[in-house]
Amino acid sequence: MESLIDIQAKVVVGLEKVLQEKGQHRQIEVNTDLLDRGLLDSFALMHALVLFESIFNIQFDDFELLLENFRTPEIIAVRIQSKLIGN
C-alpha cells in the first residue's frame, strides 16, 4: 500500500503533466487550490482522472466527477487512497 505522501507526489506530478499539455507550465503544491487558480477545467479534470485511473489501477464513479471533489491535489490523493484501501 502506498503512503498518502507517495500518492500526493504522484498526483502533483500527474496534474503538472496535464497542465503542461494545456500549455500551462506551473508548479503546484499539495494544497494548491486548482479551481480558484483557474488551473482545472472539466477537460483537464477528465484527462487527469484517466491518468490517475491508469496509474493507480482504480476507477472513479460517475457521481464523483464534480470539479469540487478535485479542488486540491491533497483532496484528490485522499480520494485515491480511499479507493486503494477499498480495492
Image (cartoon, rainbow, N blue to C red):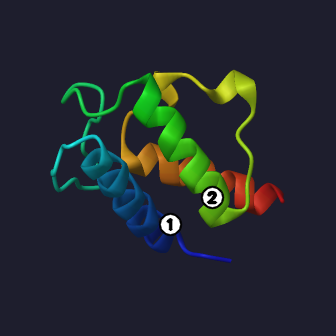
The vertical placement of 52 against 76, above or below, is below
The residue that mark 1 highlights is 7
Q: Given the image, on which type of amino acid does mark 2 rest?
A: Gln
- Residue 65 location in percent, x, y? 61, 26
Kindly state the secondary structure of the residue where label 2 is placed: helix
Which image quadrant: the N terminus?
bottom right
Tell me the CA gap for discs 2 and 1: 7 Å
The residue that mark 2 highlights is 81
Q: Is residue 71 left or right of residue 20?
A: right
Disc 1 residue crowd, few under 14, some 14–19, many 20+, Cα 10 Å = many
Q: Given the image, on which type of amino acid does mark 1 rest?
A: Ile
Circles 2 and 1, Cβ within 8 Å, touching? The answer is: yes
Q: Is residue 15 left or right of residue 26?
A: right
The vertical placement of 60 against 52, above or below, is above
Kindly state the secondary structure of the residue where label 1 is placed: helix
The vertical placement of 18 against 39, above or below, is below
Q: Looking at this view, is 56 or 80 the one in front? A: 56
